[in-house]
Image (cartoon, rainbow, N blue to C red):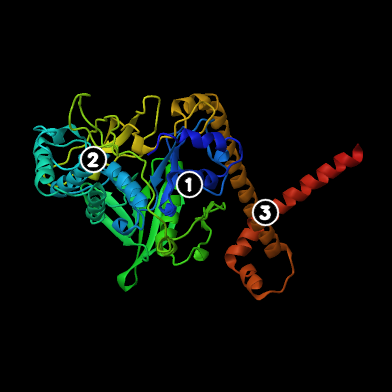
Amino acid sequence: MPHQWALLFSALLLQRDAKGQYLFDLICHHLNLLEKDYFGIRYVDPDKQRHWLEFTKSIAKQMKSQPPFTMCLRVKFYPPDPAALKEEITRYLVFLQLKRDLYHGRLLCKTSDAAMLAAYILQAEIGDYDPGKHPEGYSSKFQFFPKHSEKLERRIADIHKTELIGQKPETSERNFLQKAQMLETYGVDPHPCKDVSGNPAFLAFTPFGFVVLQGNKRVHFLKWNEVTKLKFEGKTFHIYANQKEDKKIILTYFAPTPEACKHLWKCGVENQAFYKLEKSSQVRTVSSSNLFFKGSRFRYSGRVAKEVMEQSAKIKREPPEIHSAHSTPVRSVSHGESFMPRSRSQVADTSEGMAVISDEAYSPSDSVLPTPVAEHSMELAVSRQINGAPCSIEEEKESEAGTPMYGERGDYGADSRSAQEGAGGDSALSEVEQVNKFVLSVLRLLLVTIGLLFVLLLLLIILTESDLDIAFLTDIRQTPEFEQFHYEYFCPLRRWFACKLRWVGELLINK
């Protein structure tokens, strides 16, 4: 992705109430990107919770911290057939995202598929194999996965040397996309959760439906036309679905925090609308109602997949130049090495992952990582679950392809450490806001409870004191239980209230 993004934000700062759509359109214009509906802008709040920037709302109002903000351009809706995208610039950006997914352990696959995918990347990065430029072990210098073996490195080099000679970079990228889309985890952006038994799981939304990953396999897959409702309450997330033969199922999972659960719900609502609906005019505001409160309301804003593909077919222009740079990390390569990537694909910083590709497959519980939070050194130690046990890992660095938005202090997209420093003074304010929200929730619950008690008391008075000749009231009054309640409890309580009222009245008269 381009380094010149800082230039975008001087203009953005002129509009202090700029909405997310303005920033997104500015970026797409800079990239000369027309098929932009597949993409979104992701940011991470001070509590390390991921969010998608909502285009209909003010940018500043969505941020819990103070500017400068760190944001990343990401593929939000993966194309069902990425190789069939109309323009090469779009395919290239999706290629970068999938390459990043592979590197961070989201795009899970067998070792044989992993070797082929890495070989396509290598061909796109450095071109044809040349014995004079590429010494023995050259493929081991590149970091395609979180971690891999020498055997896999040799297999990658063998494929690159023998099977891909003569392929142009754009052809290798297209072949990579075709291979990647066949994998079960294509398009997976994992949300860590736990099932009802407390076992770790990863929930994700793909172009084809909702999936649940546990261990090294996909344990649930629901097509979008089978999913009838998505709901959340606090940290609890529910998926309602109708499968064949009118089989109704409800899946329940627990997110780490209420904020993570709400983010999961929003992602599900948007993905279902994008992939399932025929027209954007069919989009409706959805609500996740609680027992007493209105709950969260959310509406997807944008075109749906079918409309996007129809619009793409109408594009008629000369293919734009691609100014972005590849970002495959290189391990321990000196400046004098002769097999550096071609000019279109400069390398980024290295980053050591923690997961390993096994002989057959690597498990999402070992290798699925969240989107990183950019810090001063572009690293962050976060906590995750490995085979059910918590452990600390060092997150991946944000590379040039990861699109951190750099800028001077006061511009959107500068180093997020500055954003964290700006947010430091707001931490106490954030705690106060949380306390206020809690107090308001308690007050609402108290008001609802008082209202219910008042209604019950009113109904009781009507039953006992009124002379309404209504059949069902008469039947209730004649039951032995009600008569016992009336004479043993209600009448003494009424006399006690009457006595107290007379006593208060006498005090007022004497004064």
Q: Amino acid at mark 3?
A: Phe
Cα–Cα span, label 2 and label 3: 73 Å
Residue drawn where x is 62% and y is 69% of the image: 476
> Mark 1: which secondary structure?
helix
- Which label is found at residue 412? none
In the rendering, at what x and y percent does residue 112 appear?
Answer: 13, 48
In this rendered view, identify the residue nearer to me: 220 or 254.
220
In the rendering, at what x and y percent does residue 442 appear?
Answer: 58, 42
In this rendered view, identify the residue nearer to me: 279 or 173.
173
Quarter of the view holding residue 461 = bottom right
Q: Quadrant of the C terminus?
A: top right
- Can you identify the residue that label 3 sits on? 454
Quarter of the view holding residue 410 = top right
Q: Amino acid at mark 2?
A: Glu
- Can you identify the residue that label 2 sits on? 125
- Can you identify the residue that label 1 sits on? 29
- The answer to whether residue 236 is left or right of residue 346 is right
Total number of numbered labels?
A: 3
In the rendering, at what x and y percent does residue 281 appear?
Answer: 52, 65
Q: Amino acid at mark 1?
A: His
Residue drawn where x is 57% and y is 44% of the image: 19
Among the two numbered marks 2 and 3 on one chain, the one whose residue lies closer to the N terminus = 2
Q: Quadrant of the N terminus?
A: top left
